[in-house]
Amino acid sequence: MNCQDESQAISLRKIFSVACLARLTHDTSLRMLYPFLPEIARGLGLPVDHVGVLVSLRNGVGIIAPAFGVMSDRIGHRRSMAIGLLCVSIGLGLTGVVSGLLPAAIGFIIAGLGSVIYIPALQAYLSERVPYERRGRVLGAIELTWAIAGMIGVPIAGTLIGSIGWRAPFIGLAIAAFGCALLTLLLAETPQSQRSHVDQLKLSSLLHHRSAIAFLMVWTLVFLAFENIQVGYGSWFETQFKLSPTQRGTAQTLFGVFEITASAGSSLFLDRIGKKRGVAGGLIVALIGYGLLMTIGPIDLALALGSMGLAFLGFEFSVVSGISIMSEQIPQARATMLALGATSSGIGRMIGDLSGGAL
């Protein structure tokens, strides 16, 4: 390995470390909403279904993600990542100190705005630096943070809620997100020689990318289906099986085991089996999980946990596989395409939050 290759390897490790820390913070801030929805609702003085609407607002911000994808392609992915994390910090901090529907809605929306800026920019930043044939492994490894947030971050949040109050994890994560924004600014911007030639992607030009259109439709439906389950399972476990916040956090650790298996499996095998096969296989597993959850889940807690875990496994594998596909569908506007993916997932999540809460 020559000096240049060694320098690039060190740089990639530094980027990976900062990205994992920031993603863990971000993912915990989103994942903790679902199992602790009843506690957050009581703390804000709102019905649970109203807080479900707040979650839909945070996810619905993804509709405007393409505008920030274009911004990221133009001003640089590193700067966009830092801006996104700063918005997450502000949104979490505001939610953690206010009461009432309107102030909380503003906090949720600002945090959602940070998500739609940060995630596509991070994915584009890494995609510019990693060849497509190895990209599944790198992006899959980053997505492990989603599972780790479920295994570690959410149980810690549950302990904080049980011992201090529902505001504690919001404020703690706001501070952590601000620190991650500062760390991100210390990273190097992708050299111009490594960046794809950036063209503004007009929505009308998508008509020439049928594969991209088809995939965005799939992406919307994948997230709509999963969100229907996710937005209600915290309340369901509380009412059906009388689980406390700490117990629900522990249950989330189990789901994290399924998810980390999916992310690790995708990272190790996706580039070998093919990314499209990975998405299809994950969806089949998720479908089986949904079916079991509907038929045998209400019978016993163990059956409910196993069925839910299987749904988490299939969903996570399909999502990690799909990100690699999106990153190369329109490479000349990579961040914009990934932002369109964020829009599709945001629409799916928003509809799923509303329908799942109502159901």
Image: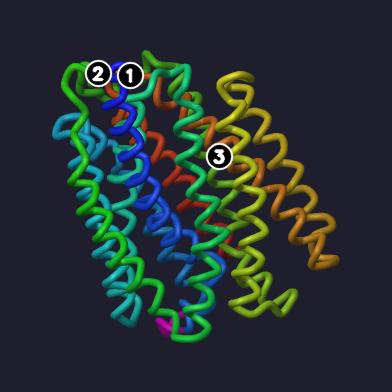
Q: Earlier in the sequence, mark 3 or mark 1?
A: 3
Residue highlighted by disc 3: 221
Q: Are marks 1 and 2 in contact (CB under 8 Å)?
A: yes
> Can you give x and y, in whole percent of width and height, for residue 241 in the image?
75, 75
Q: Is there any visible trace of residue 132 in the rendered image?
A: yes
Residues at marks 3 and 1, CA–CA distance in whole angstroms = 24 Å
| Circle 1: element type | helix
Quadrant in the picture for residue 167? bottom left
The secondary structure that most of the magenta stretch takes on is loop
Magenta span of residues = 43-47
Mark 3 vs mark 1: in front: 1
Name the residue rendered at 23%, 40% in the picture: 68
Amino acid under disc 3:
Leu
Q: Earlier in the sequence, mark 3 or mark 2?
A: 2
Q: Are marks 3 and 1 in contact (CB under 8 Å)?
A: no
Residues at marks 3 and 2, CA–CA distance in whole angstroms = 30 Å
Amino acid under disc 1:
Pro
Name the residue rendered at 34%, 64% in the picture: 108
The numbered dot on residue 3 is none
Q: Earlier in the sequence, mark 1 or mark 2?
A: 2
Image: 103 above or below 221: below
